[in-house]
Image (cartoon, rainbow, N blue to C red):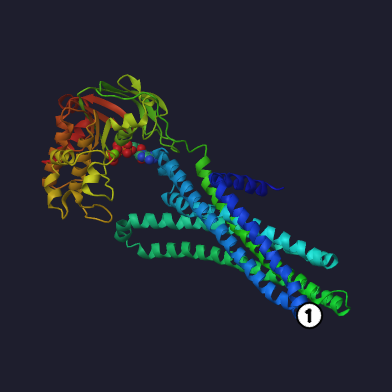
Amino acid sequence: MNISTSLTIALLRRTLGYFWPFRLYIAVAMAALGVVAVCTAGAAYLVQPALDEIFINKDKNALMFIPVLLIGIFLAKGVGLFIQKFLMSYCGLKVLERLRYELFAKIICLPVDFFGETRVGMLMSRIINDVNLISSSLPELLRIMQHSLTMIGLIGLIIYRDPKLAFWACLVFPLAIYPVVYFGRKLRKVGRNYQAKIADISSHLQEVFNGLRVVKAFAAEEKEKEKFAQASGNLVHISVKGAVYNQLSSPIMELIGALGAGLVIWYGGSEVIAGNRTPGEFFSFLAALVMLYDPFKSISQANNTIQQAMAGAERVFEILDSKELHEEQGGVLQYTSPFTGLRFENITFFYPGTSEPALKNINLHINAGERVAVVGLSGAGKTSLAHLIPRFHDAQQGRITINGHPIQDYTLSSLRTNIGIVSQDPFLFNLSVQDNIGYGQPKIEKSEIIKAAKAAYAHDFIMELSQGYDTVIGEKGVKLSGGQKQRLTIARAILKDPSLLILDEATSALDTESERMVQQALDNLMQDRTSLVIAHRLSTILSADRIVVMQQGAIISQGTNETLLVTCPLYAKLHQLQFQERK
Ligand SMILES: Nc1ncnc2c1ncn2[C@@H]1O[C@H](COP(=O)(O)OP(=O)(O)OP(=O)(O)O)[C@@H](O)[C@H]1O
Ligand SMILES: [Mg+2]
């Protein structure tokens, strides 16, 4: 047994585990397929009495009896087929539902880092396409079983009719096994490549559509067209290959079948002519042999489908099992307000796969009620510093404590619900205004949402939207200006009412009017709250109790505006830049 066969068996066993809850249905389906197999063999058997009794002996009783029996057999076969196919489709769809959910549940609990490294298109393709493939595995397996049973019935009949002839006919069969194995292997490889190319295309599409403005700004449409055409061409190339294998396997097997049938007719015909057999016996034999072809062909097709399903299973289980893809783990401590203090102790942090630390030996203490501003040039590490607090990333060295406990000790949900973050680039979901403000808080009253929106200076513009708080924003809805979006995210943070607020001010400049409104909204948000503000506006900097200056991942100075202006040349320079800009 080679590695790939044992892998296939392991994958298959694992996949079948998902069908275990439906074992009762499967048992019924199996009983139904037994009926189908018996009926098929029975129909072939009937050829002999039909021919010998009706056509040769001209028996009138048989004339009444046999056609009715034949109809009965096909009725039973039809009912059996329906029950079996319906139950199997049903189980397949239920398994599909469960696998899709498991995959989504696993992916959404992975750390933020994972989404930076992995292409989103690949993930989407796994959730949508690969899972789909898997769901057909058991139904196909049962199909193989059904056809195998039918084959056993038919082969039994052949042997019963003429053991010697059956022996010769069956000699041809091993010849036909080889293409089944060969095409199965090829198709599995094609299936794997196909899914990989689909993932390539979807991540390319996503990138291009998200970055459409950049594409247009650089007049890169032609280049993108070329890239897409190439990716699409690759996909077609693989599909064509798959189609060739798929379509070649049938005619080759048919040819092998014809070879067998030809030999049988020659031999059997000479036996009938010599008077050793009745024509009925011979035709019943031939009917069984011809009927054997269909299950045999179907088995090879089912085998191909299973191979493709296993290619999908391989990719899905790879994500479900991956040792590197740990779910985020929190502690057991419940974080409860009030907030008494946040401490960074000797924190050094690298982004995965980088050799330069983004944060170097950071020591910082924020007391309850304090407003601390962080300033520094772009890339200094301000956002990285902020993102360590809700554990979007974990530092490799040092520790961060809140209220005296390392943040790793708290449960993730209690830690995160008590920290409010307004980030640099406001993100809104494709939901109504109301649902965006109340995101993550399903039981909130509408009056609370309106109160938060008013405090964030968002109420007025919301009322001017066509459906007020029910207006859908984002992809399928109304577009908002940068300042409006920011005020909605501020309203969201106000509603959350966190004891510690992290504010990453947007770097993009707003016009004076929006700027003033955003500023007022922020003032409301920061009131009576401990806050860590990554500041780009001079007014925020000046209103802070303490200012922290960062450079290349390290804190180089701390103090008030007045002292820093004298002691820190970088701060003096930043201050001057801000001051000039906003004067
Ligand atoms: N996901 C990431 N993976 C690898 N490196 C990153 C990642 N995010 C940021 N960095 C790097 O870490 C350093 C600090 O980035 P950070 O975003 O913290 O800067 P910043 O001070 O917030 O800048 P800005 O003022 O422009 O927002 C930069 O050198 C940046 O290239
Ligand atoms: Mg930043």
Between 575 and 396, the one lying in front of the other is: 396
Q: Quadrant of the C terminus?
A: top left
Residue 580's place in the image compared with 401, above or below, is below
Q: Amino acid at mark 1?
A: Ile
For label 1, the crowd category at 10 Å Cα-Cα, with few meaning under 14, some 14 to 19 and many 20 or more, is few
Q: Is residue 159 left or right of residue 535?
A: right
Residue 171 in sight in this render = no
Ligand 1 sits in which quadrant? top left
Residue sitting at the far front = 61
Between 220 and 241, the one lying in front of the other is: 241
- On the image, which quarter does residue 575 sit in? top left
Label 1: which secondary element: helix
**Residue located 48% across and 47% down the image:** 99
Percent coordinates x, y for residue 339 in the rendering: 25, 23
Q: Number of callouts in the render? A: 1
Percent coordinates x, y for residue 128 in the rendering: 45, 53
**Residue located 69% across and 68% down the image:** 43
Residue 36 in sight in this render = yes
Residue 318's place in the image compared with 42, above or below, is above
- On the image, which quarter does residue 562 sit in? top left
Residue sitting at the far top = 404
Q: Is residue 270 left or right of residue 460?
A: right
- On the image, which quarter does residue 50 sit in? bottom right
Q: Is residue 135 left or right of residue 477?
A: right
Between 113 and 305, the one lying in front of the other is: 305
**Residue located 42% across and 31% down the image:** 329
**CB at disc 1 and ligand 1 closer than 8 Å:** no
Percent coordinates x, y for residue 481 in the rendering: 19, 51
Between 563 and 36, the one lying in front of the other is: 36
Q: Which residue bears the numbered disc 1? A: 56
Q: Is residue 7 left or right of residue 289?
A: left
Percent coordinates x, y for residue 24 in the rendering: 56, 47
